[in-house]
Amino acid sequence: MDLALEITAWSVSGLLMLLGLAGTFLPIVPGPLIIFLGAVAYWGILWGDTRTGWIGFLILFLLLALTQAVEMASSAVGAKVFGSTKWGAFGAIVGGLIGMFFGIIGIIAGPLVGVFAFEMLFAKQEWKPATKSTWGTLVGAAAGVGIKVIIGVAMVIWFVVNEIWVGL
């Protein structure tokens, strides 16, 4: 294998993975997807002459899917832990989906507005329990970011270890 090509592959994939790790903190940047694309870029630059095979990419893809599930569910779980009704948890999901169309503000505010609105309108909650559920949404979203960071780091470690030592 050409050393210059290998250095290029590690450089490009490393930069993408670092960008992806930074993106796990920011809701507007699809961090785990960029990490996955870093692994694909490595494979593509070296034209498949790598140790990572389809099993390695499948594991990375499953970790990517897990981050998406965590991101979708974390606000709703946080609301539920803080006493939300099923309406509030559903409102977090609906608000999160709608919020995606309104940029960074919508991504952050969507689940919060969704929980509060659904608690007040459909669950007929008073102001204080609805606010507590909304606070739970914020705590859940923060926990979700933490879990996404952990999974993102695991994706990078998995790729590097798999590429250097394991070769699945």
Image (spheres, rainbow, N blue to C red):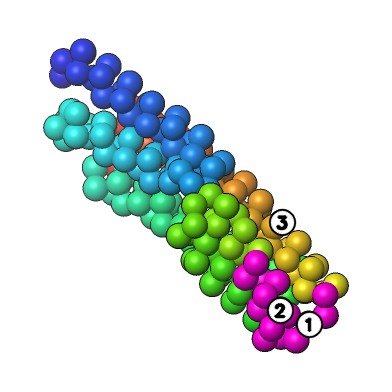
Image position, residue 132 (x, y; %):
80, 68
Q: Kindly indicate the quadrant of the structure image that contains residue 51.
A: top left
**Magenta region includes residue 125:** yes
Distance from disc 1 to disc 2, alpha carbons, whole Å, reads 6 Å
- Seen from the viewer's position, the closer of residues 78 and 129 is 129
Where 156 sits versus 116, above or below?
above
Q: Please name the residue shown 56% across and 68% down the image.
A: 95
Q: What is the spatial separation of the Cα atoms under label 3 and label 2, in whole angstroms?
A: 17 Å
Residue 111 screen position, x and y as percent: 61, 64
Q: Are marks 3 and 1 in contact (CB under 8 Å)?
A: no
Q: Earlier in the sequence, mark 3 or mark 2?
A: 2
What's the magenta bit mostly, secondary-structure-wise?
A: helix
* The image quarter in which residue 79 lies: bottom right
- Residue toward you, 26 or 162: 26
Can residue 165 be spotted in the picture?
Answer: no
The residue carrying mark 1 is: 125
Mark 2 crowd level (few <14, some 14–19, many ≥20, 10 Å Cα): many
Q: Position of residue 93 (x, y in %)?
A: 55, 70
Identified by mark 2, the residue type is Glu
Residue depicted at 19% across the width and 34% down the height: 44
* Residue carrying label 2: 119
Gap in angstroms between the C-alphas marked 3 and 1: 20 Å
The residue at which mark 3 appears reads as: 139
Name the secondary structure under disc 3: helix
Kindly identify the amino acid type of the residue bearing the numbered disc 1.
Answer: Gln
Report if the CB atoms under discs 1 and 2 are less than 8 Å apart: yes
Q: Nearer the viewer, mark 3 or mark 2?
A: 2
Residue 127 vertical placement versus 33 (above, below): below
Local secondary structure at mark 2: helix
Q: Which residues are magenta?
A: 113-127
